[in-house]
């Protein structure tokens, strides 16, 4: 059975900018920026020439359109989708580095992610910036 057939979540080839911090044996890393090569509601493959150590705990934040949110099948109520129509959303997730491959690392998300609508049209803001 191939790895493709064992996946629980459908994978989508999307380049999405990701901001990430990690906790490794040597301590917490500063905020780093990466691109996803592919992503699903269960995890992502992050493009990098310097992957974090296996089993590193990570916190990720990324901005997606509402259409991409629906495509990725993150669980959001229909009422919420209607209220957020036309907006982009921030997804904050935690996960763990589960594999290394040429060109990057695989991250498996925990199930406790948060999704927040982006109220501003300024790219590069984080959810914390929106509270100011």
Image (spheres, rainbow, N blue to C red):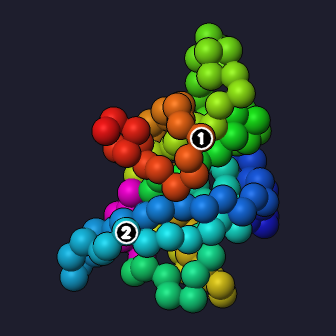
Q: Position of residue 76 (x, y in %)?
A: 59, 24
Asked if residue 91 is positioned above or below residue 57 in the image, the reply reads: above
Q: Are marks 1 and 2 in contact (CB under 8 Å)?
A: no
The residue beneath circle 2 is 31
Asked if residue 16 is positioned above or below residue 118 in the image, the reply reads: below
Q: Which residues are magenta?
A: 54-59
Near mark 2 (Cα within 10 A), the count class, few <14, some 14-19 or many ≥20, is few
Whether the magenta-drawn stretch holds residue 95 is answered as no
Look at the image and tell me whether residue 108 can be seen: no
Q: Position of residue 10 (x, y in %)?
A: 75, 47
Between residue 130 and residue 42, name the one nearer to us: 130
Residue 44 in which image quadrant? bottom right
- Name the residue: 52% across, 31% down: 119
The N terminus - image quarter: bottom right
Q: Is residue 47 left or right of residue 114?
A: right
The C terminus - image quarter: top left
Residue 102 in which image quadrant? bottom right
The residue beneath circle 1 is 121
Between residue 63 and residue 72, name the one nearer to us: 63
SS class, disc 1: loop
- Name the residue: 57% across, 51% down: 123
- Name the residue: 72% across, 63% down: 15
Q: Position of residue 92 (x, y in %)?
A: 45, 46
Q: CA distance from mark 1 to mark 2?
A: 22 Å
Residue furthest toward the top?
Answer: 79
Look at the image and tell me whether residue 107 can be seen: yes
Of discs 1 and 2, which sits in the foreground? 1
Q: Position of residue 110 (x, y in %)?
A: 44, 47
- Name the residue: 56% across, 47% down: 122
Q: Is residue 98 left or right of residue 70?
A: left
Sequence-first disc among 1 and 2? 2
């Amino acid at each position: 059975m191939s790895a493709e057939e064992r996946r629980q979540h459908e994978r989508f080839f999307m380049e999405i900018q990701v901001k990430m911090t990690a906790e490794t044996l040597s301590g917490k890393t500063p905020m780093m920026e990466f691109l996803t090569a592919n992503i699903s509601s269960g995890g992502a493959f992050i493009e990098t020439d310097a992957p974090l150590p296996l089993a590193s705990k990570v916190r990720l934040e990324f901005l997606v359109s509402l259409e991409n949110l629906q495509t990725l099948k993150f669980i959001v109520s229909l009422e919420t989708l209607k209220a957020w129509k036309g907006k982009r959303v921030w997804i904050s997730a935690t996960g763990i580095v589960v594999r290394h491959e040429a060109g990057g690392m695989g991250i498996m998300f925990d199930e406790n992610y948060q999704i927040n609508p982006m109220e501003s049209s300024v790219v590069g803001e984080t959810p914390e910036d929106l509270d100011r």
